Amino acid sequence: MLDAVVVGAGPNGLTAAVELARRGFSVALFEAKGTVGGGARTEELTLPGFRHDPCSAAHPLAINSPAFRALPLERYGLEWLHPELPMAHPFPDGTAAVLSRSVGETAASFGPRDAGTYRRLVEPFLPKWDTLARDFMSLPLTALPRDPLTLARFGLVGLPPSTWLTRRFRDERARTLFAGLVAHVMAPLGGFATSAVGLVFALAAHSRGWPVARGGSQSLSDALAAYLKDLGGSIHTDYEVKRLDDLPPARAYVFDTSPTALARIAGFGSHYAHYRYGPGVFKIDYALDGPVPWTAPQARTAGTVQIGADSSEIGAALRAASREGRAPDAPFLITVQPGVADPTRAPAGKHVFWVYGHVPNGWTGDLTDAIERQLERFAPGFRDRVLARATAGPPQLAARNANYVGGDIASGAASGLQLMLRPKLSLSPYTTPHPAVFICSSATPPGPGVHGMSGHNAAKAVWKRLRQS
């Protein structure tokens, strides 16, 4: 009998399997798709030689992840590549605010009236970032805080809505960039703990940047898989699990799946019936005949570029998708241009380009025209460089990854108390009604993103259970 079976080979499932195998447990991993990766894959979606990331592309949380940093993934081919700027946020007038590795450069891009405010906001946390990140991403009670005072201070700043925090800024440039950071988790700007979301992304950039993985996000997944195999774990792809009886006998079962899928597989009935799914996204991967022709020079060297004219436009786009049940007329866009750091992603002189906008959960329309109109506002002539595009709305994203219910790439609404207390209000969110069944997906703390910490935290709960039995 195996010690543990893991279902789902996304970053969290892979991390949970690795953590258990590192501690001497026998582990088998089962994945429904033909390759491992989940939200961290790379494929030729458009033209031969153009390597796209269907979901995650830039990795501020991965490079800062306490779980990944403790693993020898570089030995298995993972290499982080850094653009000149982690992120830029261009404005209609051709200027841009930036999120730089340097706090000073970032603050200066906001203008003199907000430079000092920004410094005072982030600089107290930077010297203790590694400890803060571990404490923040290990919550709830999987570990005692190493620096409870800094964590409490962060909570005082981060728990209020981001709209409260941005009142500290006097000009729109800083407000807009920060609103864009919050929008990465598709949460309304006035929601609980949204200040913490923006701060985490900013601190991650200042600490270690927002890199891409050489060759694509698949490199991270492949490194985790190779390490698992070296530890004696086995991986089985093209293996869809519909019920627990489909799996071999084991002392523990760990699911990197949505809560509703787990309830269906394990027969938990309505246990997760109140779990909410958030807005979906409409994603386009482009093959381009050259770099994006951004008007703002800073955007041309940034790995990630946020698109939203001001904080009001960003807020309106989020409200339309999350509360009003309609696609926004001017969508907020998150874009990634891997080629500024990794020219191997496309043939010489060509580029891949990654972009998505928010839409209602399960939306079946086509946002292509609205997305490209937004891009043309900040990069006139963009359409002229398009060689091919691959589009995916919520139905296509859900078909590609079953955890993205209704196109929700956060695997559950990251708003209200569910931002932190997921999938249910519990001191042990990784356990389930069955003592041998656990959940480790992004539906558990610390939530969405490629960081592996949900898998890491769940593995702790599993090995404590295995040592007791």
Image: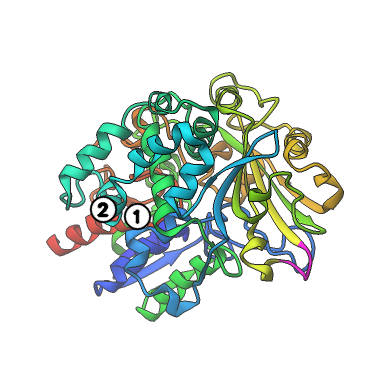
Q: Is residue 227 above or below residue 305?
A: below
Circles 1 and 2: CB distance less than 8 Å? no
Indicate the quadrant where residue 443 lies: top left
Name the residue nearer the viewer: 60 or 218: 60
Residue visible at 34% across and 38% down in the picture: 121
For the residues labelled 1 and 2, the Cα–Cα distance comes to 19 Å
Q: How many marks?
A: 2
Q: Position of residue 444 (x, y in %)?
A: 35, 44
In the picture of the structure, the residue carrying the numbered disc 2 is 128
The answer to which of 366 and 347 lies nearer the viewer is 347
The image quarter containing residue 264 is top left
Q: Position of residue 185 (x, y in %)?
A: 48, 38
Crowd tier of the residue under label 1, counting other residues whose Cα lies within 10 Å: few below 14, some 14–19, many 20 or above: many
In terms of secondary structure, where does tag 1 sit? helix
Q: Nearer the viewer, mark 1 or mark 2?
A: 2
Q: Earlier in the sequence, mark 1 or mark 2?
A: 2
Q: Is residue 287 above or below residue 397?
A: below
Above or below for 261 versus 127: above
> Is residue 372 visible to us here?
yes
Question: From this viewpoint, is residue 427 visible?
Answer: no
Please indicate whether residue 54 sits to the left or right of residue 451 in the image.
Answer: right
Query: Please, what secondary structure does the residue beneath circle 2 have?
Result: helix
Q: Where's the C terminus, which quadrant?
A: bottom left
Residue at the spot 46% in from the left edge and 25% down from the top edge: 170
Query: Which quadrant does the N terminus fall into?
Result: bottom left
Q: Please provide the residue range marked out in magenta.
A: 346-350
Question: Which quarter of the figure has residue 360?
Answer: top right
**Left/right of residue 419 with respect to residue 463 in the rendered view:** right
Label ID, residue 453:
1
Residue 22 is a magenta residue = no
Three-letter code, disc 1: Met
Q: Position of residue 325 (x, y in %)?
A: 60, 21
